Structure formats: structure tokens, C-alpha cells
Image: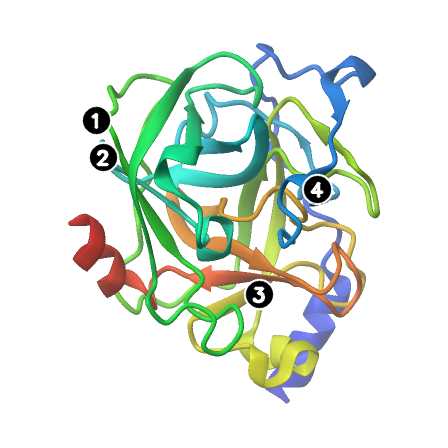
Amino acid sequence: MTRHLLWLVLCLIPFANLQEAVDNQNTEATEDEVQDIELEAACPELSGQIIGGRPSSVSRHPYQVSMVLNGNSFCGGFIISRDYVLTAAHCVQNVAPQAVRLRVGSTRRDSGGRIVAVSNVTWHASYGQPQFDNDIAALRLAQPLVFGDSIQPIRLPRPRQPVPLVRLTVTGWGLTALGGRRIPRIMMEANVPVVPHWLCRLSYGDALTSNMFCGGHFLIGGVSSCQGDSGGPAVFRGTAFGIVSFARGCALPLSPTVFSNIAALRDWVTQNTGV
């Protein structure tokens, strides 16, 4: 009975009630704010954009980081301390630390804020066993960050803290249209409802491990992360519960986004960052 009720509720959940009023600095989305980028050419394995979202700003999400490789934005990340940023392992596996730059403190992915060098990259030793499991990595910064209004860390959940069945906010600079190759210059955000683990397993089967959880409109799709947003956070009330990991397509029905469950991997975070 409970499962049938939950299914009914999920059927009736409307598209995300996106948060009100972003600040008016650099948040006016126009055609000039979009640039053609061959994302797959820059990083062909990525699968993680904001579909069905709206413009946002670094003043709302001062923990958000844009990762740059060979001059191209290719993933997101988020600040957890003066010395560390978390992201997805699939974004940085086999990438040399000196090749990665982080843009912090900016609403735009291509200007503003600060460019920060990375001194060390650590991804989970069991990443990909099975595929996409333990999809988490820590980036040690070459110099400590100076916190201010546009650069702040985000809280992490307690070890094994349950992911609440709420709408999480995802942010990034990923694709904004299905099958598109155009990514915005300004930060986008969307609210995605958490999908119960048992329900998400109907889509992903045994590929969905206890180190993962799902978010999205399960039956109707329409709101999601996608290419370019991988490694970014999924946040509720100032706590990052997830890291954008993978999905079957983007914002498709019956194919919610899968996030790395930070609470399930919390001990690894502490061991590798001290946070």
C-alpha cells in the first residue's frame, strides 16, 4: 500500500517550483550568453547538464566551482574547505592535477572570480567497481581559498545520514537542451525530487548501489542534470547530499539522474580531506 501511495505522489509531483528571484548580476539569459562547445570532444565520457532549470548566481551558490581542462569547462565541483573541492571521480580519473584549473567565485564559467590551481587529485580507490560506484574525488588546492561572499564551503551530511525525500537543488553550467551542444556561460539551477531507492532500481537494477541515490521526475522526466554538470552538488538546506554522477540520457522519463551518496561515502571524505 505504501509503495502504491508513493507512486501516486510521484505521478502528481509537478515540474520543480524553482526558487524565486536570483540576484540581477550576470543572470539575464540571452542568446549572447550561450556558446557552442564540443563537450564530447573535450571530454567524451561525461554524462552529467541542467535541463528544465533557470539562471542562477554565485551569490546563491558560493560553493559552486567550474572545472577547466585545456581551456574548456568540462565538469563542476564544490568547495568543502579552504583546501579541498569535491567532484566526481569520472571527471578527473587519469587527469594530471596540473592540467586542471578551477574557477571559483563567479556566476560565469568563462570570466570573473578567481582561477585556482590544483596540487593533487585523489579519486576513490574502488571507483568503477561496479561501474560508476564510488564516483567521488577530492581536489587539493595549490593555495588555500580566501572566503568571502562569493566563495564559501558547503556543509556535508553526517556519515550514513539518510537522504531526505525532498527536492534537491542542482547547479552548474551544463547543457540546457536535450541533444544540444550549447552550454550557458552563466550558472543554472534546477530543483529535482529525490526518487526512492526501490523505485530507482526499477530503472537501473543492480547498477544502483547503496553508494548512490536518484533524483528527477521519475515518470515524466523534464528536469535533470546532463553533460557538463557532472561533479556538481545536489543540495538541500545548505547541505550537499549528492554529487552528479550519471544517467541514461538527460531528463528522460523513467531515467532519473544518479548521484553519488555523500553520506554513504562520508568516511572516505574525512580520511582524504580531513573534513
Q: Give the residue at x 22% y 35%.
A: 83
Q: CA distance from mark 1 to mark 4?
A: 32 Å
Q: CA distance from mark 1 to mark 2?
A: 5 Å
Q: Position of residue 114 (x, y in %)?
A: 39, 16
Residue 145: name its quadrant: top left
The mark that comes first in sequence, 2 or 3, is: 2
Of circles 1 and 4, which is in front?
A: 4
Res 275 seen here: no
Tag 1: amino acid: Pro
The mark that comes first in sequence, 1 or 4, is: 4
Query: Circle 4 is placed at which residue position?
Result: 41
Residue 18: name its quadrant: top right
Q: Position of residue 26 (x, y in %)?
A: 61, 12
Q: CA distance from mark 4 to mark 2?
A: 30 Å
Q: CA distance from mark 3 to mark 4?
A: 27 Å
Q: Residues within 10 Å of mark 1 (few under 14, many from 20)?
A: few
